[in-house]
Amino acid sequence: MELDKDLLARQEARALAKGAKNAQLRLRTFSQAQLDAVCQAVAKAFYDHAVELAELAVRETGFGNAEDKITKNRFASRRVWEAVADMKTVGVLKEDEENKLWEVAVPKGVIAAIVPSTNPTSTICYKAIIALKAGNAIVFSPHPKALSCTLRAVKIVAQAAEAAGAPAGSVGCLTIPSMDGTRELMGAKEVNLILATGGPAMVKSAYSSGKPAIGVGAGNGPAYIHSSADVSLALKQIMTSKTFDNGTVCASEQSIIVEKTMEDRVRQEAKRQGFYFMSTDEAGKLAKLLFRPNGTLSPEVVGRNALALAKMAGFPVPHDTKVLVAREEEAGPTRPYSMEKLCPVLAFYVMESEDAVLRKVVEVLTHEGAGHTFAIHATDMAVIRKFALEVPVSRFLVNTPAALGGIGAATHLFPALTLGCGSVGGSSSSNNISPMDLLDIRRVAWGIQEQEHQTQPNDLVEIITAKILERLHKPDKL
């Protein structure tokens, strides 16, 4: 008798969750040196297969390009390992002898991890390293469009981890892509945390599972080119970011915003560098391809280069075109260019003043992308400070390609492929997710004043009150 695919997926999810739980009970006893050895082995094995995995991902999904996916894979292995290598994640993390407080690391347990089709291999290595570094087991749920490359990546990681001493089951993956299977995994009693990177529906499902979850919101970051910026460099950085893996990094810029006095200067330099400003008719043709009737981004445009997009829309562009740009004025559900576009397409806003730019930035992010990323190109510290205090994002990037700066490749942010958006973006964290987000902290606290056994309740109240009053008169001690 042939069993139903969804039933098989659910059964597989249960088995993987149980296996991961058994593995994690052993992992939680590992020393720091043992966990580090496992993570280092994973990073090295993945780095050695970076080219193979990148080419496999492009062939299977059609998203992005192999050269940049190789860079992503190397970033997710070597760069992430370098960032966590000296991080303490086992035992007592901190001893405050003066205040008699200890902080003890406690692994979350079993992590269910959702894998996006745009970064199907690099996400595996990154999430495996940060999970294992914190003493957790991890089970992946692949995207159906990226099943083969995801399974290959997980096999490389799991084999390396086990060869370095990790118990079998420490790294697992569903082999039957199914929403039923994914829901079963997220809801399994053995799973302690969900690490959700993917589309809005999947992230919402993770938060609705009844389990603690770290999810991400949509990226829709504007880039403001201020009058104090080096315009040529700013546009070069935006170009680098927006064409990296054909725009599939969620931190990449989605619009350029300038003041009216800067419009001609920015347009001329942008055209010189390969930005193509579409006519109203051309922008209308492309807009019809960008989003499906239900408002979601069409997978047909994700990760395609500018020449392919123009050809699909039916209009010619110069052969050296790298990014397509549409003039825009508003932000909202009827304005496709005001939304996240995971391809080299940008909106272009022109405002009358700096204050109008700030209002437009907030308007765009409030519509979509709140809590994620904003980029400013400026040397005027006053305007940087002004915007930093007002723009509702978790990553405020200055003079850097947003795709690379946001993930920590071109900044000193933690190198990550899961970018929290904070409460304003509907996320439980605003961090670039690291091993420290996958630990609980047990706090060991000593009483601040010893009492004799005969102390009466009223005496105790007086002592506590006196202590509070003492501290109120010493605010530096609070």
Image (cartoon, rainbow, N blue to C red):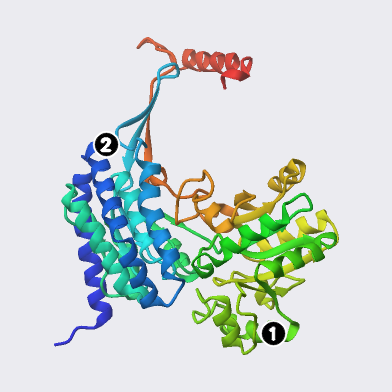
Residue at x 35%, y 53% (from the top left corner):
77
In this rendered view, identify the residue nearer to me: 248 or 474. 248
Relative to 439, is 128 above or below?
Answer: below
At mark 1, the secondary structure is: helix
Q: CA distance from mark 2 to mark 1?
A: 57 Å
Q: Is residue 337 left or right of residue 18?
A: right
Quadrant for the C terminus in the image: top right
Question: Furthest residue to the left?
Answer: 1
Residue at x 58%, y 13% (from the top left corner):
470
Badge 1: residue crowd in 10 Å (few <14, some 14–19, many ≥20): some
Relative to 226, is 267 above or below?
Answer: below
- Nearer to us of marks 2 and 1 is 1
Task: Name the residue that disc number 1 marks.
Answer: 282
- In the picture, the disc for residue 32 is 2
Q: Earlier in the sequence, mark 2 or mark 1?
A: 2
Under mark 1, the amino acid is Glu
Badge 2: residue crowd in 10 Å (few <14, some 14–19, many ≥20): some
Asked if residue 210 shows in the view, the reply is no
Confirm or deny contact between disc 2 and disc 1 (CB under 8 A).
no
Q: Where is residue 236 shown, x and y percent of the image?
A: 63, 60
In this rendered view, identify the residue nearer to me: 193 or 123. 123
In this rendered view, identify the residue nearer to me: 8 or 407. 407
Q: Where is residue 443 shown, x and y percent of the image?
A: 38, 31
- Quadrant of res 382: top right
Q: Is residue 246 left or right of residue 345?
A: left
At mark 2, the secondary structure is: helix
Relative to 3, is 257 above or below?
Answer: above
Residue at x 36%, y 67% (from the top left corner):
54
Q: Where is residue 63 shown, x and y percent of the image?
A: 45, 74
Under mark 2, the amino acid is Gln
Q: Where is residue 143 shown, x and y percent of the image?
A: 37, 72
Asked if residue 63 shows in the view, the reply is yes
